[in-house]
Image: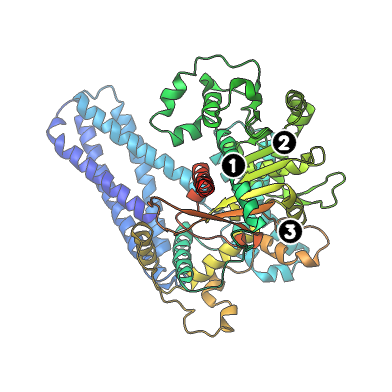
Amino acid sequence: PGRPQALLSLRRWMGILALYAVHKGRFSCPGGGLLHSYLLVLLLLLASIICALSALVYVSMQGTISNPGPRKSLPKLLYTRLFLYLPEFIWAVVGAVWVSDSSVRCEKTVINAIIGTVIASWVIIIFTIIGVVIVFDPLGGKKTFYLTDSVHRNLESSQSGQLLYNVKNTATRVWEKRIRLLCCCIVQDDDHRVAFTSIAELFRAYFSDTDLVPSDIAAGLILLHQEQDKMESCPKEPEEVLCHSPSSPVTEDLDVELENAAHYMLFAAAAYGWPYYVYTNPFTALCKLNGDCCRSRPTDSDTTGSDHHNFHFGSILKITGLQYRDFIHISFHNKIYEIPFFVALDHKKEAIVVAVRGTLSFEDILTDLSADCEDLTLEDVLENGFVHKGITQAANYIYRKLINDGILNQAFTIAPEYKLVIVGHSLGGGTASILAIMLRNSFPTLKCYAFSPPGGLLSKSLADYTKHFIVSVIVGKDLVARLSMPNMEDLKRRIVRIVANCNKPKYRILLRGCWYEVFGGDPDNFPTELDGRSQDALTQPLLAEESLMVHRSPSYNALEDEAHSSSPPQYPHLYLPGKIIHIVEESSSRRLCSSDIKYTARWSNEAVFSSILISPKMITDHMPDVVLKALNSLSQEHGSCISC
């Protein structure tokens, strides 16, 4: 963080210097001497801060990530910068007092300029305090105790066991306070408090065994991306997928599912309401919705939750092309574990569609991060297994609404011959999948389309059970479809290994990586300590790696001990639901700005998504508009082939 702080302080210093030069002759007014002194001292104070930050930046650029020797003077410089916060705070208070003094009667432009300077000082101080509160780790040296294996060997000692428990408890409370601070803008109840504790446990377990800062992680991701691109450019074995000939029944089945997926993806996207519609139609959306905003909501459909100006419902109508009378129930209600959805009649496919919204609020993010596992118990289903806790609770909420409130009964009373289809994207896709499992016994012909669902969703037995009625659609290198605790642990180990054993300074890695991501070129061939080692030696950790990760985190140890334990681990292996359609770019363009993309689709399996792939498109491939574009492209291509 020293570099951006130094640049910010330099720009601030230059701005105040320009302000002082412009108004230099206007401080002869009553009280002007105070304002003149304030600016001069502030310039000197900022110059001292810039010098301290410049020294910090210079020293931090020395050595490599795993060789901190050349950076041994860094703590002294950090304490120097920390000491300078005291006079900066005092002078901000003094400036606020002086500029608000009624005895100061200078020109209004001068006073306004000084007020702007004082406000800027306070904004920077407040954000710095917030940043320190969020980032500061109060465990300090206790973390070393927690990480050492000797603690585990000495757990027979009640004192060691109690100390270990206290350290873990403190670490969990630290993460919980950070999460509460970040979510301070939302109303918090008992569900939120339980979720905060659960999420804090997850972060504590994941980050407890590493000594990496954000810039280390960024450097690791850059190196992994370039290494991955080098491997992709080399000849390799064909991807492990279900192969088939162009005229096989499997291909015909794929074409049918792609056509259905393209159709139902409209419903999954529509569930996002006006944010998605405005995002995909930035210039015309508001004008089109404005005509419907004053129209009264139809009485035929049952609606819960707030929809100001009817924008959400108007957007759903525009995206799906349905009529008012086609909607049975619309819920805009959104809390933790309670996500919006709607039920509509799709006359084109003769289906009753339940569309579940994906992540769009803080509450949804908390639902996503409540990644503990719980057992899903279903009557008459032998393949019971573990599921994502937060998403399962969201599915339970919708299940109760559909069954207990009679929503599905009402829909089937209107259209008894229609089939039930459940769809959703991202969080909505995961919720739709678990909801489909819950409804499967009551509706045997049910079908579910999960677009870009989270990877850590179902245990292997449940994932296999859902292959009969769920189809998952994944585009490219989608990050969310590969998110699970085992995959995250694997990514952490890969980052630690490649970062610890690269013998180039971090600033060179980051600068070269930024150039590579923006402008492309050949992957950099950074020499590492791995070069020249035998294959057997590569399986052994290096000293640098050991210095950044003392031992595997509790969640990772739980995964390894899964086979040796009768009780379920906290984060077992979880998989994508149903049969998987993987859509990839035919001519894979690695850059963000690529036009006229052509896609291919194939049946895949969960093994393809057992590792997180680093790419500029790992986020964009997850977006609903990208998924819809890919499906429409494939559907239109199939339609043109049939017409030919």
* Residue 606 visible in the shown view: yes
Q: What whole-number distance in Å separates the C-alpha atoms at marks 2 and 3?
A: 54 Å
Residue pictured at 57% horizontal, 68% vertical? 549
CA distance for labels 2 and 1: 28 Å
Mark sitting on residue 365: 1
**SS label for mark 3:** helix
Q: Nearer the viewer, residue 380 or 514?
A: 380
Q: Is residue 629 above or below residue 557?
A: above
The residue labelled by disc 3 is 162
Side of 391 relative to 72 (left or right): right
Q: Nearer the viewer, residue 589 or 528?
A: 589
Mark 2 vs mark 3, foreground winner is 2
Please say if 610 is above or below 368: below
Q: Where is mark 2, residue-wise?
A: 420
Query: Which structural element holds mark 2?
Result: strand
Give the residue type at disc 1.
Ile
**Which comes before the other along the chain, label 3 or label 1?**
3
Q: Is residue 541 left or right of residue 410?
A: left
Question: Could you tell whether 102 is left or right of 160 in the image?
Answer: left
Rendered image coloring scheme: rainbow
